[in-house]
Image (cartoon, rainbow, N blue to C red):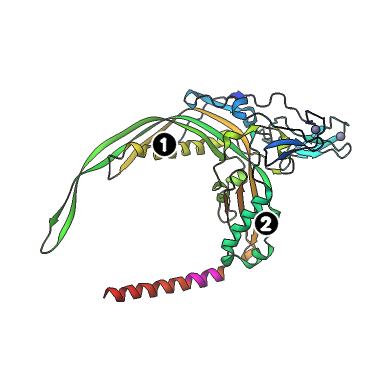
Amino acid sequence: MVYEQHDGPTVIDTAAGSGDGIRKCPSCGSSDIQLDIPSGMLVCHFCRHAWSTPLATEAFHLDTPIGDLRGRVIGSGSQNIVPGTDQVVSFKCAACGAEISIDTNHAMQARCPWCRNTLSINEQMPNGAVPDVVLPFSLPKDAAVERIGAFVKKRRFFANRRFIREFSPENVLGVYLPYMIVDVNANLTFEGEGEHTTRTYTVSVGKDETERRFDYDVYRVGRRFSLHVDDLTLESASDKRDQDASRNTNNIINSIMPFDTKNAVVYDANYLAGFSSQRRDVDVDALYEPAAMQTEDIGRYRSLDTISFYDRGVRWDRRDVEIMGERWIAAYLPVWLYSYQEEKSGGRKLLHYIAVNGRTGETMGSVPLNMTRLWVFTGIAEVLGVIAAGLSALILW
Ligand SMILES: [Zn+2]
Ligand SMILES: [Zn+2]
C-alpha cells in the first residue's frame, strides 16, 4: 500500500548551545574527556570530575503523549541530508587557531596536532553526522569480548577452520550506529471475514468409519482503533539497511534489539571518544514507509486480542493505516562489532558480523561454515534419522 507523507516538519531544536571546537571540563578546563562506561558519566582525565548531559526525553520534551502528535515532528539533527555536503569537516582549533579536518564518516573528534586539545564536532550540519541524541555504551569491552568468545565457542565445530585460526575477539570495535527513534500516532481500520465454530460432532460414513464435522458461522468483522507506537528503532545507514544475504549479514544487527532508548542523552561528541561512529545517510522520507509498515504489523498483532471469538481465524481483506502524527529523533546507539570478511570460491566475499548490544549484552552473529564438516554431519544425521524411522516402523509392525 502507499502511505501518504506529511508536509513540512515541525522541528524540535536539539542543537541549542552546541558549537564545534573544544568542549572543556566544567571543573578544570581540560579537553581530555571520555565516557566512563560503568557509571555512564563523562569523566575528565585530568581532574576526575564527572558529569553527564541531560536525558533527551526531558531536555526535548519527547514524552508528550503520542496520542497528541499531529503531522511530522523531527529533531533538528534528523533533517534531510543536503547532497554534496562535505563529509570531511574543517574548522579552526579554538585554542591555537590551527586548521583541523575531521572525516565525519567515522569519527566526530580529533586531537589538534599542535596544541593537543581534543576537538569535537557538535554543531548539526546537513551531512547527517550529528544526531539529536546518543545512548552511551554501558557494557564494557571485556564483557563484549567474553560474549563474542562464548558465541564462537558454541559454534566452533562447524566453523570454517581459517576463521577459527584468525579469530581474535579482542579486535572487537565499539561503534555508534545511526538509528531513527520514531513515535507514531495512527488510526487503523481493518475489515474482513471471521469464522466461529458453533458445533463439532462425529458422523458415521459407511461401515466402521466416522468423520469429524464442524458447523460454523461466517461474520463480517471490522476493527477500528488508534495505535500509539513508542520508540520504534530504524537503522539509518544505507549499507546496514542493505539486506542482501549474499553480500552481508546485516540482519544480525537487527536481532540484538531492543535498546533502552529512554535513557538516551543529549548529544555530546565526548561520549564518542575512543569509539568509532557511522554517519546517517538515510532521510526521514525514505524511512517513512518502513515505519508505516511496521506500524501496520504491530496493529495486526495487537488486533489478535480483540478477535479471539473467531476461533477459526479472521482474514483481513482491507487494512488502512492512517498516520495522524509522527516524531523522529536521530540517535547514535552503541554496538560492539566483530567483523570478518570471508573469501568464498570464485572471489566472492561475504561480510560476517558478531554484534553485541552495547547496553544489554544481547549477542548475535554469523560464523563462516566449514561446508565439508557440515555436509558430512548432516549426512550422518540423516542416515541416523532413516535408521531410527526404520526401527520405529519395525516396532509398529
Ligand atoms: Zn577536569
Ligand atoms: Zn590547537
Give the quadrant of the C terminus.
bottom left
Instruction: Please tell me how crowded label 2 is: few (under 14), some (14-19), or many (20+) other residues with Cα within 10 Å.
Output: many
Query: On screen, 300 above or below 245?
Result: above
Choose between 215 and 306: the one closer to the eye. 306
Q: Is residue 154 left or right of residue 307?
A: right
Query: On screen, 156 above or below 118?
Result: below
Q: Quadrant of residue 139?
A: top right
Q: Which residue is mark 1?
A: 299
Q: Amino acid at mark 2?
A: Pro
Instruction: Please tell me how crowded label 1 is: few (under 14), some (14-19), or many (20+) other residues with Cα within 10 Å.
Output: many
- Check if residue 304 falls in the magenta segment: no
What residue is at 26 percent from the left and 36 percent from the top? 220
Q: Which mark is residue 169?
A: 2
Look at the image and give the residue range highlighted in magenta. Answer: 373-378
What residue is at 23 percent from the left and 40 percent from the top? 218
Percent of width and height locating residue 389: 36, 72
Q: Is residue 122 left or right of residue 195?
A: right
Q: Quadrant of residue 318?
A: top left
Q: Amino acid at mark 1?
A: Gly
What residue is at 43 percent from the left and 40 percent from the top? 297
